[in-house]
Image: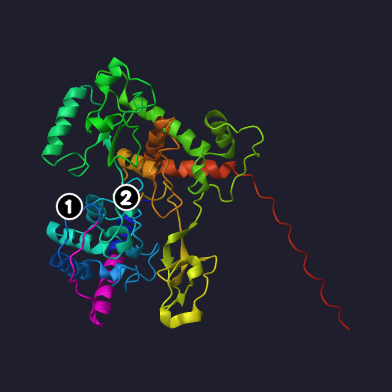
Amino acid sequence: MSAAMKNYATKASSFGLMLLASLVLGLTACQELETVPVTDSMHFVGQAGEISAEDLDRGRESYMLYCYGCHGMTGDGNGPASYGIRPPPRDLRSGTYKFGKVLKGLPHDDDFVRIIRHGLDGSVMLPWDIPDSTLTDIIHYIKTFAPDKWRIEDKDPDDLEKLGTKIHVVTPWESDWQEMQESADTAWKEGTGNDCPSPYRCLVTFEEEKLNEGEESASEEDEKAEPRWVDKDWASLLPTFEEWPCVMVRDPFVPQPGSDKDEAVLRAEAIELGKKTYHAFQCWQCHPSYATTDEIREYTKELNPPKPGDPPPSYRNHLFSPQNKPSDVYTRRPWKEGVACDAAVKADCPEELGDDCRTCQPEEVCVSGFCEFKVAVTPPDFLLRNVRSGSTIAELYKTLAIGIQGTAMVGNLDAYSDHPDRLWALAYYVRSLLDVRGTPTAAAIRNRLNESMPAEKPTPEAKPDAAPATP
């Protein structure tokens, strides 16, 4: 796309968003918006104390100002501007947050801040410049839409959801453990500990360190290298991502201090390994393939060879395009009142509907007691558009490791535990595709792939019917 066309597209997009905003304001002004004031204080997961009713009510007012247009009065994603937006705005009642970037748990407040402050690229979720105190109130109020996930009152501690595990990427590598530990201890005492909120403490795990792997006794050398950011009694436990609120990792393709390896060479190696990993482990089941079927077979044989008895590989239609995936989280109610769903799908039906409740159809899902259609989500084609949230190597690694909640994009941290370099290599490969999107290089990749497809046999032309005989 030429610079002039890009400028035109940008202006057209901006005009469309301005028009949308005007329509939202107009719709809002034409109806009376009545929300219930918050009168009770609440205690949420991850908060040191209760959030006052006054703070929550300020959050309600600010939410109606900034968020209501898309996310709706009740957080259901059915605001007046939501119709026609694909994918539709987040249903905040579900307590599932697509880009929370945490392992197995609820996002931290700074994850909400990141999403709201930076927006989601390529969507109508724009960056919002909201005062800090106002943003904090909004985040607290958003949690009231999913009380089963967030509220602590009257719950067994064993049944509580927990804040998810965060991943912090340490780069460049630290060579002096003692200095690293002292710096970390100071940071936690001052409440400024990297990406992990105080008072949590981190366990630093480096892939090549053979610590806590079940040995009967650690060597003297291992004892010296053992991370000590946790209480001494905890240090002997086998670290799992459910047990630690923060895990630190490092990029193996960044040269270690004192290394004679060239960064450009390491990056090229990472991209090549990432390309093989992407195709050998079938990322193309959802995203496009950027390799021919012959290349896929070659990469699979090298990195993921089939086992005896495995069926021969098969490839989906339209291999070089993304595959739409219906989502249980992105849904849309087909009509205003909706159709109530019955308890067979573990949803509560309004009592006044009685026997009118029914089981949802296969293409539907029961959401808060009503059947809604699953919306097909299109995975990104990295040669055409950017990723929604975080496109640096480190952020791409986090997305690949953690996954995207509510989608077919599952976390891969455990799957690549034996080969963590491959997961990092995937991040480098995706970044390399994003770097050339919209350029002649991307067009050349497309042309090469299209030329690899077998030519379709021409359909024989139908013979015209004989003219009717004249009497």
| Residue at horizontal 32 percent and vertical 58 percent from the top | 149
Q: Nearer the viewer, mark 2 or mark 1?
A: 1
Q: Position of residue 307 (x, y in %)?
A: 61, 32
Closer to the chain start, of discs 2 and 1, is 1
Where's residue 238, x and y in %?
A: 35, 32
Magenta span has 18?
Answer: yes
The residue positioned 24% from the left and 79% from the top of the image is: 33
**Callout 1 amino acid:** Ala
Residue 35 falls left or right of residue 343: left
Name which residue lies at 38% across and 64% down: 88
Looking at this rendering, what residue extends furthest in the top direction?
220
On the picture, is 366 further left or further right than 199? right
Question: Considering depth in this image, is 20 or 118 the residue closer to the camera?
Answer: 118
Q: Quadrant of residue 226?
A: top left
**Which residue is tagged 2?**
389
Q: Looking at the image, can residue 239 be seen?
A: yes
- The residue range painted magenta reads 15-44
Residue 446 x/y as whole percent: 49, 44
Q: Quadrant of residue 407?
A: bottom left
Q: Residue at x 42, y 69 (%)?
A: 332
**Mark 2–mark 1 distance (CA, rounded to whole Å):** 29 Å
Q: Is residue 426 above or below residue 154?
A: above
Please name the amino acid that badge 2 sits on.
Ser
Count residues near mark 1 (Cα–Cα under 10 Å), then give few for <14, some for 14-19, many for 20+.
few
Q: How many labels were placed on the picture?
A: 2
SS state under label 2: loop
Depth order, front residue of 157/323: 157
User: Residue 48 — which label?
Assistant: 1
